Image (cartoon, rainbow, N blue to C red):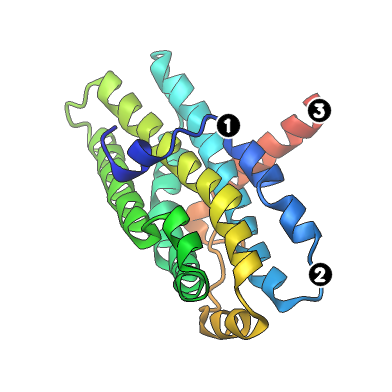
Amino acid sequence: MDNILADRYGINSSTELAIRNGCRAVADAVDERDPRVAVIEVLREEHRNVGKLLDVLERQVVIFEAAERPDFGIIEGIADYFLSYPDLYHHPKEDLVFRRLCERDPAAGERVGDLQAEHEELAARTREFAAGVQDVLDEAQVPRESFGNWARGFITLQRKHMNMEESVFFPAALAALTEEDWAAVDARIKDQDDPLFGRDIGDRYRLLKDDILRWERDESKSG
């Protein structure tokens, strides 16, 4: 897929590896009472949640590619979630941190790249994927291979982006930003409850949440 993310980052490790191991060494070296940890942990928790959704979506894509019928209710819920939460609430938080990083350590900011442009790229790909899902639901003449390619491209793009943030962006921010920077970022973060992983699950996400819980139980049994 020709886009700024795929061109810049040839990261092959899985999302799970990035989420679990990305900047753990840096965060562990910081006192848990340090205010900067609170913001980063919110972002990392949201990455873990996105990772779960991508795993669920990938399982549905495998079913689809096997010429079987996936659960389109789950796929639609995933597309809707990406449209309504990460693009509107998660990425703006990271943009606040990134602007502070560029002020404190311009060289580190250059190593991260144009984060806001990457977030805009992700938003465009999310809309493209959601439109593809809607076409399938509307029984439009969408080739099976085309939809599979859209979905896998979307999954790959999201994972590469999170890998970069976990391994490059977050450690750089932890190293460069001051307590005052983190306090300013925290003050500007919108207190928006996650409609899928938060306290009150929206009705449209209950089926998806149940599927995630089943998958986690299966994983714990197999592990």
Find out whether the residues at labels 2 and 3 contact each other: C-beta distance under 8 Å: no
In the image, residue 131 above or below residue 204: above
Number of the front mark, 2 or 3: 2
Give the SS element for disc 3: loop
Earlier in the chain: of badge 1 and badge 2, it is 1
Give me the residue at 22% from left, 31% from top: 139
Point out the image quarter for the C terminus. top right
C-alpha gap between disc 2 and disc 3: 29 Å
Which labelled disc corresponds to residue 32? Answer: 2
Q: Which residue is mark 3?
A: 223
User: Residue 110 appears in which quarter of the rendering?
Assistant: bottom left
Horizontally, residue 216 falls left or right of residue 60, namely: right
Earlier in the chain: of badge 3 and badge 1, it is 1
Give the SS element for disc 2: loop
Give the SS element for disc 1: loop
Give me the residue at 46% from left, 55% from top: 112
Mark 2 nearby-residue class (10 Å; few <14, some 14–19, many ≥20): few
